[in-house]
Image (cartoon, grey):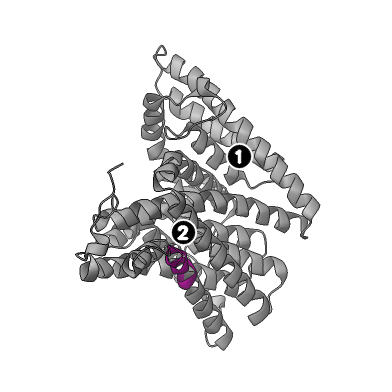
Amino acid sequence: MEAAQFFIELAGILITARLAGELANRFGAPSVIGELTAGILLGPSVLGWIEATEIIRLLAEIGIILLLFEVGLETDIGRLARSGSRSVIVALGGFIVPFLLGYTASRYLFGHDLLLALFIGGTLTATSIGVTVRILRDVGRQNSREGQIVLGAAVIDDLLGVLLLAVLYEFSRTGEISLTGLGELAVFIGIFFVVAPIAAKLVSYVVGHFSNVTEIPGLVTTSIISLVLVFAWLAHAIGAPELIGGFAAGLALSRRFFLPFGVALASNPKFADEVERDMRPIVQLFTPIFFVTVGLSLDLRAVEWTSGFIWLFSLSVGFIAIIGKITGGYLLVREHWLMKSAVGMAMVPRGEVGLIFAELGRSSGIFDDPTYAAVVLVVAYTTLFSPFWIKLFYRLFGHRPELAEEAHPT
């Protein structure tokens, strides 16, 4: 591709993603839906103006790594302690039930092979903490009891989802499911998550010191991006997806993260705030490219929509995606059904995390076009419609005393 052609295509991606994101936001939907739609419009499904070339996919890969960095940076480990065992119960239920139902339906109802069934089940375990936080804030419930349970559970889902992603990536790389390989990967990832925070904390102290004496701007941004990319390379070197490195870097630099074995490496809240402020524009530049690329990778024209299989499969997976998460809320046995319903519904949106699973399945050659389209549509459906039915739920039942008790603001 000529440089000038790439420049105009990249400009088209960024501008269209922004406009579509603003439009989606205006109608009360998450901006990620607008960005995904922008890719569908620009790609082979509709206009066919832009192709997901290797260089665009490389920029999208940077976007996904930075997205997981941001997820790690915003992960609040302390929230788990405040929300207690209820968040753990909801998270485990909302993780295990969709995974097992998705795997079982794909494997035995639709006859998919083992690895494909595992990827479909894995995609359904996701919960988008970004979308969930926004919905709860829109209805004024982020500090409610159910809000604290949901946000704590979403943190656990993020951690479990990233680990599952690493396991499925290893399976897709080797082409087989080996308990020995799984054990080795678990050991490598364990070591990585122990060493990475220590290294990141040491780097943060060095950068934090020199940022106060240098007169050249951009030291924090340059250093942190370099750190994220090095961690991504290290993750790949141990056999995990590169995005694991981004997540570990963000988690280690989070002002809410703590190292129980290293009090001397306590967080520096001021530096963590500086990292968030300086990195946010970079993350906001690259992550829309990833979501647009997901849409560019979809060729809806190649899907045989007259086939009964595609409709049965997508509707079945969509049903499992919703019921599986709502089930997690109903495991709270001592709560009123309204509280259980509120918690379960807030866990439904898959958002960016579900799209990460879907894209890894496509790029690994696990998903064919119809399966990839069905999975992306399920992720889009749960993300697009969740804000509307949750707002309707609180409009009808938000005044009930079973939902009136507020938790202490965080």
Say which quarter of the image contains residue 147.
bottom left
Query: Magenta segment, principal secondary structure?
Result: helix
- Reading the image, the residue beneath label 1 is 232
Whether residue 96 sits left or right of residue 389 in the image: it is right
**Magenta region:** 322-332
Relative depth, front residue between 6 and 194: 194
Q: Earlier in the sequence, mark 2 or mark 1?
A: 2
List the single residue furthest toward the left: 399
Three-letter amino acid code of the residue under disc 2:
Val
Between circles 2 and 1, the one closer to the viewer is 2
Q: Label 2, label 1: how many angstroms apart (C-alpha)?
A: 30 Å
The percent position of residue 241, horizontal first and vertical second, equals: 64, 48
Relative depth, front residue between 361 and 140: 140
Residue drawn at 50 percent across, 59 percent down: 126
Residue drawn at 42 percent across, 13 percent down: 214
Whether residue 137 sits left or right of residue 17 in the image: it is left
Residue drawn at 80 percent across, 51 percent down: 180
The percent position of residue 100, horizontal first and vertical second, equals: 60, 68
- Reading the image, the residue beneath label 2 is 90
Whether residue 128 sits left or right of residue 56 in the image: it is left
Circle 2 residues within 10 Å: few <14, some 14–19, many ≥20: many
Q: In the rendering, which numbered label is found on residue 293?
A: none
Residue drawn at 52 percent across, 77 percent down: 314
> From where the camera sits, is residue 110 visible?
no
